[in-house]
Amino acid sequence: MKRRVRTYLLVVGLVTHLVIASSGVAVLAADLHRPVGVPGATPSESVVASPVATPPPLPNACRVVYKIRDRWTTGFTAELLLTNEGPRTDGWTLTYRVSPGLRVVTGWNGTWSQQGLEVTVRNASWNAELATGVTLNTGLSASFDRHGYSPTKFTFNGVVCKV
């Protein structure tokens, strides 16, 4: 029974601590060291939560999902889902590298350009602000003269994205 109570207390203490740490709520140090208990548990069976520093989000961190939507002999359309995992930004640029022989024809939900193997999409006037956690849907139509058009190394405002 004591082992079950201790395990329960440890789990409750960790969950409480994780919720406090991940919520970004300011908590007094005295509150972090207050024992977490269960009715009927003795003080020796209580768990003390200790503070853990949570790192701030990386500036301009992002996640990109790239999906081919339509494909034909000499081209395709693709959708890019860009999620801002960093702080709110007012203005953004997404860049990535493509295979030789790929040419961007047109794009939507941003201003698209290509210089050699680097493709760039910048915000439109109406979607410049990206709050933390917001996902933007953008996409393009491209032509190619050979297969193997998978993009690589997405960067969002200069920071490498998770893919």
Image (cartoon, rainbow, N blue to C red):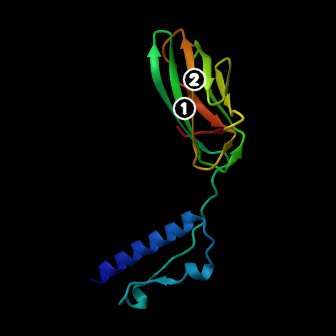
**Residue at the front extreme, as displayed:** 126
The image position of residue 4, as x and y in percent, is 30, 78
* C-beta proximity under 8 Å, tags 1 and 2: yes
The image position of residue 49, as x and y in percent, is 51, 76
**Rendering quarter of residue 127:** top right
The image position of residue 20, as x and y in percent, is 54, 69
Amino acid type at mark 1: Leu
Instruction: Between residue 83 and residue 55, name the one nearer to us.
Output: 83
**Rendering quarter of residue 142:** top right
Instruction: Between residue 120 and residue 6, name the one nearer to us.
Output: 120
Instruction: Between residue 41 and residue 122, name the one nearer to us.
Output: 122
- SS of the residue at dot 2? strand
For disc 2, the marked residue is 140
Residue occupying image coordinates x 58% and y 21%: 98
The image position of residue 9, as x and y in percent, is 39, 78
- SS of the residue at dot 1? strand
Label 1 crowd (10 A; few <14 / some 14-19 / many >=20)? some
Q: CA distance from mark 1 to mark 2?
A: 8 Å
Amino acid type at mark 2: Leu
For disc 1, the marked residue is 80
Which labelled disc corresponds to residue 62?
Answer: none
Q: Where 157 falls versus 54 (above or below)?
A: above
Quarter of the image with the N terminus in it: bottom left
Residue occupying image coordinates x 47% and y 25%: 68
Label 2 crowd (10 A; few <14 / some 14-19 / many >=20)? many
Say whether residue 68 is left or right of residue 122: left
Q: Where 121 falls versus 163 (above or below)?
A: above
Residue occupying image coordinates x 45% and y 20%: 70
Say whether residue 102 is left or right of residue 114: left
Instruction: Between residue 72 and residue 151, name the one nearer to us.
Output: 72
